[in-house]
Each structure stands twice: as C-alpha cells, then as structure tokens.
Amino acid sequence: MALIDPTARIEPGALIGQDVSIGPYCIIGPDVAIGDGCRLLAHVHLAGHSTIGARTVIYPFASLGTPPQSMSYRGEATRLVVGADCDIRQGVTMNTGTAGGRGVTEVGDRGFFMAYSHIGHDCRIGNDVVFANNASLAGHCVVGDHVFMGGLSAAHQFTRIGAHAMISGVTALRGDVIPFGIAAGAKGRLIGINAVGMKRRQFSPAAIRAVRAAYRQLFFGEGVLARRLEALEAEFGDNDAVARVIAFVREARNRPLCYPGNRREV
C-alpha cells in the first residue's frame, strides 16, 4: 500500500507501485511510473514519460523527466528510465531523450547522485556510478559501470567514460576517458589508472599490472595509435581488463581520446 501525503499532487494515469512513500508537496505527472518501495521525501517533481526503478530514494527539489535542453526538441514523447536502488539527492535533474537522439535517457541501478548533479538528454549511464555534487553531463554521453564523477566536473556532449574510470573534481572533459582511467584538470587530461578502484572491485594484482602496462604502451609507446593497439592486443589480448580498453578505443565515434597532459590529443 502506498503512503501518500495529502499535499502531494498525482495526475491521473500515473502508476504507483506497492509500498511507495510520497512525501509533502511532490508533483507526479500522468505518464510517470514509480516502482515498488520507492521513497519520494518531499518537493519531488517527476514529469514526462518517466520510469523510476524499485526502491529508489529521491530527495527534495529533484526534478526528473523534464524536457531535454535541446533546441531541436519539439515536444516529442521521449523517455527517462531510472534503475532500481538509486539514491538521488537534493536538486538533481535528469532530462528525457530527444527524437533525433536515442529517444531515451537511461540510468542504471544503484547510482548515487549527489546534490545538483545533472544528466542530460539521451545519456546512457551504467550501474553503481557515483556523481558528486554538481557533476554534469551534456547530451548523448555514455558512462560505464562503477564510474566516479567528482564534484563540479562536466562532460562535453557525446563524451564516453569507460567503466571503472574516475573523473576528479572540477574537471572539464572534452574527450573519451578509457576504462580504468583517471582524468583531471580544466582540460581533462589523463593522469594514470584507477588502481585503487580496481582493488576495491576485486580485480587481481595481475589485471592491475596489465592495465598499467597497457596504459604506458597505449599513450607513451612508439608509432601511430593503430599500431600501438595492435601491439597491445598481441601482448595482452587474453586479459579481460585490457581487452575492455582496446575495444573502447576502437569504438570511438564522436569525440577524441583523452590523453595524458604531455601527449597530443589525436
């Protein structure tokens, strides 16, 4: 049975799951579906064609499912899908997709979105991510599992951030960050690999050593990038962690690769 504060406004057509708690002054649109066990503490705004996964907790003044911040948007019925067990803090914003993009913004399970972080239209966010205060993504970004976005960091549209990467606070990303990479600074340069995060995720010492060696070879080795990738595959192709890095680099489409500060971006 849902527990709904009498001051909350829920439009006809909204789907409310079992054991949902909706606090004071929340506003729920007619095309919103809220999963079982969710908690909306107070002053939460859910709009658009939005689905909120089970047991997600949303704090005051979060606004989810609002129209994309895109000049091309013409009111199409695009969507926002938020996974289960997310923790969405004060003032967080997440927009729906665009018809010219994927048509949907997707957020995975168990994400922790701290105050005033923002997910732009058509983004695809993995599981177990952490977005610190005011971390922001422009449209069409892709973020892998277990990514940490530091406070006041931001990513240019179409940027990809590989799984297990860490983006330091006050970092401006213009290029793709490889899996396991750490990026920092106003120009978003790589500064190494996220060995601490890999240890916490139970990667073996051998896997960490392989990724560290692959990082050195990829960014500081001789020859053009294509040749360095071939050398990496020949030497480390049977290592799953390094294979992720190789696949990520080869799948580049819209943004350049983020490089260490003493290497030119290509």
Image (cartoon, helix red, strand yellow):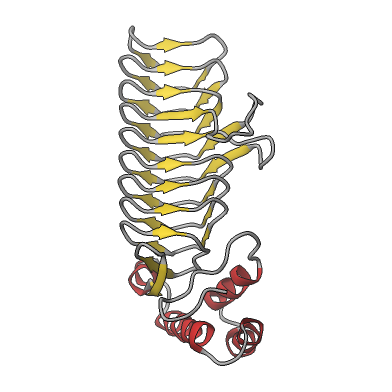
Where is residue 234? Give x, y as percent.
64, 89
Q: Is residue 258 left or right of residue 185?
A: right
| Vertical comparison of 225 with 3: above or below | below
Within the image, what quadrant is residue 63 found in?
top left
Check the picture and name the quadrant holding the C terminus.
bottom right
Q: Is residue 92 above or below residue 179?
A: above
Q: Quadrant of residue 117?
A: top left
Is residue 196 left or right of 105 when viewed as pictured? Answer: left
Q: In the rendered image of this protein, does residue 7 appear above or below residue 202? A: above
Give the percent coordinates (x, y) of residue 131.
Answer: 37, 49
Point out the image quarter for the N terminus. Answer: top left
The x and y percentages for residue 256 are: 57, 66
Q: Residue at x 63, y 65 (%)?
A: 252
> How many numbered marks have been drawn onto this rendered protein structure?
0
Q: Which quadrant of the view contains residue 196?
A: bottom left
The answer to whether residue 16 is left or right of residue 43 is right
* 243 in relation to 81, above or below: below
Residue 35 in view (yes/no): no
Is residue 217 in view? yes
State the residue at coordinates (41%, 22%): 45
Q: Residue furthest right?
A: 100
Residue ID at (33%, 38%):
116
